[in-house]
Amino acid sequence: MNYKEEYERWNVFEGMDAGLKSELQAMNDKEKEDVFYTNLEFGTAGMRGVLGAGTNRLNIYTIRKANVGFAKYVLGLPEGKERGVAIGYDNRHMSYRFAIESAKVLATYGIKSYIFESLRPTPELSFAVRYLKCAGGIMITASHNPKEYNGYKVYDDTGCQLIPEWADQVVGYVNEVADELKIEVVSDDEAYPYMTWIGEEVDEAYYKEVMSIEVNPGMEKDDFKIVFSPQHGTSNIPVRTCLTRLGYNIVPVLAQCAPDPDFSNTASPNPEVPCSYDLAIKKAKEVDADVVVICDPDGDRLGVVAKHDGEYVLMSGNQSAAVYLEYILSQLKEQGKLPANAVMYNTIVTSDLGELVARSYGVDVEKTLTGFKFIGDKIRKYEATKEKQFIFGYEESYGCVVKDFVRDKDAVQAVLTAAEAGNYYKKQGKDLIDVLNELYQKHGTFKETQVALAKAGAAGATRIKEIMDNLRKDAPTVIGGVKVTKVEDYQSSTCSDGSTIDLPKSNVLKYYLEDGSWIAARPSGTEPKCKFYFSIKGVDANDAASKTEVFQKDMMKIIGE
């Protein structure tokens, strides 16, 4: 059916939710096309979209459809019904409703569910799956997206987001649903026997594990001041509880602590956006804090601002992770606790700096595709074989995990690591930026940036495809005046030097340049954007910055933007 026929199918449905019915009747033709031209699909982090009526929007009907697919997947697992599914949700509009709808669909198939009594961060959902020995998990969240969005992420029995092999099974079941409007769901009364509320017991078990990641637990902490913001999201209680119990001096940004689906007191809930730190930095200046830490709404990403020479300096996800690595590995080595078979994971669009830090300590490094599920899957495999021992995993997008009792990004762990590293280096007369600069002196100066081209709607999807197709048909041989020495195409699993890529296929292109820099292009799996990653190597910070500007301008010229 075309979008007009799909619209009519929804508009005439007698059981349509009243709020969605009003939206449908107020739509113009352009809006109808946008919300019905396609279906929401699973991307690198599950299903995420704008809230509202339509097959290309997130609503109770598209949520039910997704849950039918996941329920059939769970039924195919050993004792899937009895082991059940853990369900978490964040502060966004409709999150609680979608969590209950998910539990009701599962109950319709006779599957138990364990639902958090109130909002919790994504990493705690991952932990809960493992702690309760569930067959899987569901997290209702749109992570760092704007307030208009919500999302649906699914997890395996290790607490890891479904890898493509298993996500494809879910998608297959989802696609078998002929009409999402006619999915039969049990009543609340019929669902209750299958639903168990969870809370304090799981919280305390999670907090205990988080607090156990300290590398130097005996350090004095009173003179290290931390300003913290949960950005109106889920990390407020976990972060403040763990840091307070460990004795840290934590100053919350109270205006951003209350759960708020509209994110009323923040310019952006995304730690990748500099304006999201405005209120926290203002508070840091008032109290003379040593470091600022902010989490995204679902508590899986952490942004860090360090006080350096009297100024508050924002660190990128690549920079902060490199400093965490330096701290953790140097201390483990000094204590004689660094495993001989240690391995660190990051992604194909992550800076080279972290890899250089890890290898300087004899730690092996393995790359994965973008998406933390691939890191979680690596952990699972080596947990079984014992061939290597996990030591750290991270993405450039402000997400990392220190200990593997969680199999997703964990900002609560990251806050503790940032606090401990900052406190340790302060006692040596240094700050986090000083340590970063030392790493640059040792390993080379890198500047990592990202350009995200927003291309919404049907026309946007066509344009994103056109950009990637054109780059494949006419690959640049020179970018910014620097020769391209190698091209990797992760969709065809091939390299221009004749080698092959041993990773799942993904729509990513990566260009290696003669000066040690690289540039990558990939469509986002969760937003209507085409992303370009720049990892530029320079002789110093000024050189790297000026080269970055040249590379960005030339890359946009190459793709015709």
Image (tube, rainbow, N blue to C red):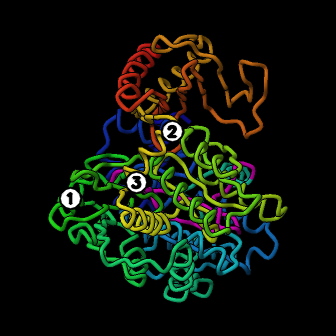
- x and y percent of residue 245 in the render? 41, 85
The nearer-to-camera label among 1 and 2 is 1
Can residue 14 be seen in this snapshot? no
Q: Which residue is mark 3?
A: 144
Neighbourhood count class around disc 1 (C-alpha, 10 Å): few under 14, some 14–19, many 20 upward: some
Neighbourhood count class around disc 2 (C-alpha, 10 Å): few under 14, some 14–19, many 20 upward: many
Tag of residue 524: 2
Above or below, comparing residue 2 to residue 262 in the picture: above
Residue range highlighted in magenta: 137-165
Disc 3 element: loop
Q: Residue at x 31, y 37 (%)?
A: 28
Disc 1 and disc 2: Cα gap in Å?
Answer: 29 Å
Tag of residue 279: 1
Q: Residue at x 34, y 51 (%)?
A: 146
Q: Does 489 sit left or right of 290 as displayed?
A: right
- x and y percent of residue 104 in the render? 57, 74
Task: Verify CB contact (< 8 Å) between mark 3 and mark 2.
Answer: no
Above or below, comparing residue 344 to residue 348 in the picture: below
Kind of residue at badge 2: Ser
Q: Residue at x 47, y 29 (%)?
A: 536
Question: Which one is earlier in the sequence, the residue at label 3 or at label 2?
Answer: 3
Q: Does 144 sit left or right of 200 as displayed?
A: left
Q: Residue at x 54, y 89 (%)?
A: 201
Question: Which one is earlier in the sequence, the residue at label 1 or at label 2?
Answer: 1
Q: Residue furthest left?
A: 286
Disc 3 and disc 1: Cα gap in Å?
Answer: 17 Å
Kind of residue at badge 1: Leu
Can residue 227 be seen in this snapshot? yes
